[in-house]
Amino acid sequence: MLKELRIKNYAIIDELNIDFKSGLNILTGETGAGKSIIIESLGLILGERASDESIRSGEDSASVEAVFDISQIKKIREFLAKSGIETEDDEIIIKRQISRSGKNRSYINGSAINLSSLKDIGNMLVDVHGQHEHQTLLYPENHSTVLDLFGNTMPLREKCRESYSNLQNLQMEMNELINKERERVQRIDLLNFQKEEIDKAELNTGEDEEMKREKNLLQNAERLHRYAAESYDILYSSEGSVTEKLNTVITAIGELNKIDSSTEKFLNDGREVLFQIEDLATRIRDYTDKIEFNPNRLSEIDDRLAEITALKRKYGANIEEILNYRKKIDEELEILSKNQERMDGLSAEIERLKKDLEIIATGLASEREKAADRFESMIEKELKELKMEKVRFKVNFSYEDDESSFIKYKGKTVKVFPEGIGKIEFFFSPNIGEDLKPLSKITSGGELSRVMLSIKNILTNKDSIPVLIFDEVDAGIGGGVAEVVGEKLKKVSKNRQVFCITHLPQIASRADAHFQITKKTFSGRTITVVKELSGEERVEEIARMAGGKVITDTVRKHAEEMIRKGGE
């Protein structure tokens, strides 16, 4: 609910603070006193466009500030939380500042907010009905919500929206997979080629290094054989070889040992050295015999190393990396094969969702049409009670043909929207002989306000907007009809806060809070003054509204009686 409104330097208002009450808040006063200015200033809080022409003469800027209790409006708290705006004590303070320099600002709880977001919040907080822009009935897209609230089809509508959203998401995923199908097939072909190329090579870790060593030996076989043969000859087989000379030395040491037994160790060591040299010569001989002169094997190694080098250029710096890449090929092929499985699964799921959505959307359309008959009758009954005896009210359904759609309704293939099939718009004719026209074409603020009052009266306990403002709801009525309007406003105010500007005492007498707006002159300047009335002051205002310029005791008593009845 709107708890407080603060206005400064707006139109003929210099500075004004108003504390409002729950229930029915009535604003009364002479024509031109500034009642509509208060509603216009509230429009700024709701996100309406600002004009520097509204700034009080002689001032550079104006401001409007409102305090709202949002304890019962969860979606506003969620909206503000997403915007990073904190709330305390279930209250928000909205402030608009307008300046002649054009630097206009909007704030919620001290945090700057753009006009679009402010308007979204305003739509959740307040519904204004009269000659103002902030009128939900002027927007046909809101009419389906009204009908769904009336017909208790909102759960089915939400189910339709959820099913539609799920279908859209799956179709987007399917389209993405289809668009990538060519890439997927090409990727599979490439991976299979790479897999076959690597597998055909039958690589073994480290084999390239081993072949490089073997290649080195084959390339140097002649030199190896020459050096080995020379070594063997010098050590053993040639005349004057090392072994031959060492045998001569050992023979000499043997003679030496015969004379001097202490040289026996020389003899033993000499024999040991001879044994080692003979063993070395034998091993060199065996090595020489194994040296291979094989040009064919060298060619085979060159070919194999060339093959491995080519694979390295494509798949890794070494054989280990190539084999690791080969494992990744299998992993990716498995994922790509699952894409096809996903497409098959998506296709089946999409078909199932289409069938479900068709059942939900056509069922919702049928329920709406049933509800529309009752809604039309009840609205016409309400409006006739409000002295619109010749009124006609119609809920118009239009179903858009769409050959590509999967939903059939009444023999036609129709387009589906998140909220169901078909567009809903309220049509209205106030008088006999006038064609039904879209409600959005109504130019009379009084007629529009009475239509909304009728709707709000029917939707008591179902509509979630907590604050309603009615301007000119009493236009062209009086007497018993005014009493009916007052009763309906009172009824609506049991479940939400209602503001009503009125000239009729029958309506004003039902106020839970009655505010009088007057114009006064101070120091040569005209200002608007707002005063909450109670007791005798309120009796005098009701009497003024009922009796005109001359207020007699009889008129006062009548005013007292109206207030008493209005409070029952």
Image: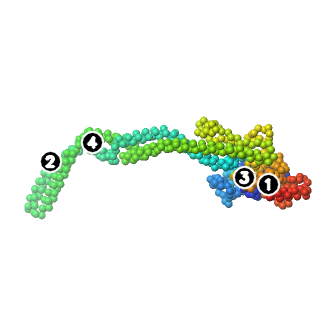
Whole-Å distance between the Cαs marked 3 and 1? 20 Å
Residue at the spot x=63%, y=49% of the render?
155
Whole-Å distance between the Cαs marked 2 and 1? 134 Å
Q: Given this view, does label 2 or label 1 mark the residue nearer the observer? A: 1
Whole-Å distance between the Cαs marked 4 and 2? 27 Å
Element carrying mark 4: helix
- Mark closer to the chain start, 1 or 4: 1
The reply to whether the C-beta atoms of the residues labelled 2 and 3 are less than 8 Å apart is no
Residue at the disc numbered 3: 460
Identity of the residue furthest to the top in this view: 403
Q: Quadrant of the C terminus?
A: bottom right
- Mark closer to the chain start, 2 or 3: 2
- Mark closer to the chain start, 3 or 4: 4
Element carrying mark 1: strand
Colour mode of the rendering: rainbow
Residue at the spot x=21%, y=47% of the render?
287
Q: Given this view, does label 2 or label 3 mark the residue nearer the observer? A: 3
Residue at the disc numbered 4: 219
